[in-house]
Image: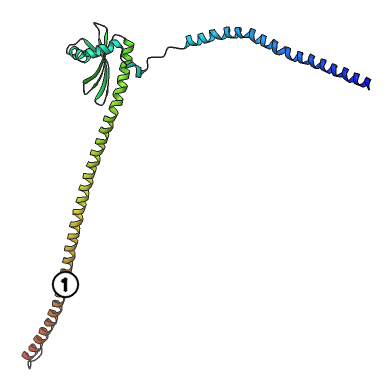
């Protein structure tokens, strides 16, 4: 009994020792992996950083958005408040402004004008040749961007006008077609009325002609009977006149 107990205790101790050794072996690789990862991390970061910088350097700068182009800078807002419209109208009386670009859409439009003496650009948005907005700038790129924005806006503003013009033309065309169709219907109605009247007249004439023919036929029959009677009387009288005379 005592012997068995000692054997069991020895086996238990051996198992505990074996389990501790296994646990220690299992825990060793994660520590080495963590250390390896920690050592490799700076290398990866060092390698990735230039790639990101190269990508940022290779990405071209985006052009100014059209919606942002028409937003006035403080200087442009100050100039616009000072009366760019009046200034441009005054300059247009001379011949020093050069018209670089102009876009017309309906009664709206945009223009890019250049004043060479001061290397200044005037970008305008107008309706019926009346200036609505005038932007003055010496920045060529900004002037082109504002002009494109104004050209797009002029097209958007003219959409209602273009639609109205087309609808007016369609309505006028429809009204004209209605008038022409109604006139054609009236002429056909008049022709039909004349045809019906003529048909009634012809029918009456036909009836009258038929009645007259019947009357004439009766008169002809009576006349022929009377003729035969008279001829018979003539023959009888002739016989009486010539009665007793020798016959040839």
Quarter of the image with the N terminus in it: top right
For residue 135, what is the image quadrant?
top left
Q: Residue at the left extreme?
A: 241
- Decide: is 237 above or below 5: below
Residue at the (13%, 77%) spot, across then down: 219
- Color theme of the render: rainbow
Q: Residue at the top extreme?
A: 117
Residue at the (93%, 20%) spot, across then down: 2
- Tally the marks: 1
- Determine whether the residue tagged by mark 1 lies in a helix, strand or loop: helix
For residue 166, what is the image quadrant?
top left
Q: Residues within 10 Å of mark 1 (few under 14, many from 20)?
A: few
Compare residues 102 and 61 and report the one nearer the observer.
61
- Decide: is 164 above or below 100: below
Q: Where is residue 184 in the image (x, y as percent from the top left)?
A: 21, 48
Quarter of the image with the C terminus in it: bottom left
Residue at the (23%, 42%) spot, across then down: 175
Compare residues 197 and 44 and report the one nearer the observer.
44
For residue 227, what is the image quadrant?
bottom left
Q: Mark 1 points at which residue?
A: 211
Q: Where is residue 194 in the image (x, y as percent from the top left)?
A: 17, 57
- Decide: is 239 above or below 38: below
Q: Residue at the front extreme?
A: 2
Q: Residue at the bottom extreme?
A: 244
Q: Position of residue 42 (x, y in %)?
A: 60, 7
Residue at the (21%, 15%) spot, across then down: 85
Compare residues 231 and 198 and report the one nearer the observer.
198
């Amino acid at each position: 009994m005592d012997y068995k107990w000692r054997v069991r205790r020895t086996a238990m101790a051996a198992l505990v020792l074996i389990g501790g050794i296994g646990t220690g072996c299992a825990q060793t690789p994660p520590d080495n992996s963590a250390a390896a990862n920690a050592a490799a991390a700076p290398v990866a970061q060092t390698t990735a950083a230039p790639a990101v910088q190269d990508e940022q350097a290779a990405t071209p700068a985006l052009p100014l958005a059209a919606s942002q182009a028409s937003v006035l800078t403080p200087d442009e807002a100050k100039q616009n408040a000072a009366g760019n419209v009046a200034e441009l109208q005054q300059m247009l009386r001379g011949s020093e402004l050069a018209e670089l670009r102009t876009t017309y859409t309906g009664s709206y439009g945009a223009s890019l004008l250049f004043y060479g003496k001061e290397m200044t650009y005037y970008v305008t948005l107008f309706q019926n040749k009346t200036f609505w907005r005038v932007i003055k700038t010496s920045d060529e790129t900004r002037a082109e961007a504002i002009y494109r924005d104004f050209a797009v806006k002029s097209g958007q503003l003219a959409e209602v006008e273009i639609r109205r013009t087309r609808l007016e033309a369609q309505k006028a065309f429809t009204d004209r077609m209605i008038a022409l169709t109604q006139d054609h219907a009236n002429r056909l109605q008049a022709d039909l009325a004349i045809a019906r009247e003529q048909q009634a007249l012809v029918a009456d004439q036909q009836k009258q002609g038929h009645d007259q023919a019947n009357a004439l036929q009766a008169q002809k029959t009576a006349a022929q009977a009377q003729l035969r009677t008279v001829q018979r009387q003539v023959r009888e009288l002739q016989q009486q006149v010539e009665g007793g005379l020798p016959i040839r």
